[in-house]
Image: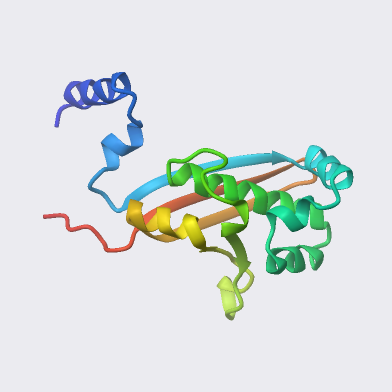
Amino acid sequence: MSAPTARRGMVDTARRGGALIDASLRDGAIVGIGVDAVDVARFREVLARRPGFAARFFTDIEQADARRAPDPTESLAARFAAKEAVMKALGTGLGGFALTEVEVRRGTGPGATAGAPSLMLHGSAAALAARCGAGRFHLSLTHTTQVAVAFVVAERSVPCSLS
């Protein structure tokens, strides 16, 4: 496909209100991508002002993992960003499903993957992922004292054929 033809296809998709990623990756291995950033200081204020916030939006496992971190707020902020990034990767906005239906877990294996974050979807989040064809999720988290960022790639459960 020539560059002008590809650009024309993306413009047509944009005019119809579709997502450009859907047009360009419809038959590929990637279902969607999502990224989100959380201001750590603002998140710290929310946690202080609303004592039930953590219990409402994080699973018991996530809260326990965060308590083991040097700064639990930074850890929770990164997990919150991951939950929103998953919603974006699946094409829904905030409120598409309960935030506790996306759980960030720490890897327990040996070597380089020890402590690596991974995602476990439950309930309607898992059902939406299945409808979208997303069977695998790749998650990267990072944070500083100022910002927490999550990047998610939702991948098809069955590798696509190149032929």
Q: How many numbered marks, from 0 up?
A: 0
Image x and y of residue 54, in percent: 77, 54
**Residue shown at 84%/45% (left/top)?**
50
Image x and y of residue 113, in percent: 56, 72
Q: Is residue 17 left or right of residue 110?
A: left
Asked which colour scheme the image uses, the reply is: rainbow
Residue 13 vs residue 115, the one in the foreground: 13
Query: Which residue, as the protein is rendered here, is positioned at the far right?
Result: 48
Rendered view: 119 above or below 145? below
Q: Is residue 137 left or right of residue 20?
A: right
Image x and y of residue 143, in percent: 70, 49
Query: Where the C terminus falls, by quadrant?
Result: bottom left
**Residue shown at 78%/50% (left/top)?**
53
**Among the 4 quarters of the image, the one containing residue 103:** bottom right
**Residue shown at 57%/79% (left/top)?**
109
**Residue shown at 53%/49% (left/top)?**
97
Image x and y of residue 84, in percent: 58, 45
Residue 61 vs residue 159, the one in the foreground: 61
Q: Is residue 25 left or right of residue 68?
A: left
Query: Where the N terminus falls, by quadrant?
Result: top left
Query: Which residue, as the protein is rendered here, is positioned at the far left?
Result: 163
Q: Is residue 34 left or right of residue 3?
A: right
**Among the 4 quarters of the image, the one containing residue 75:** bottom right
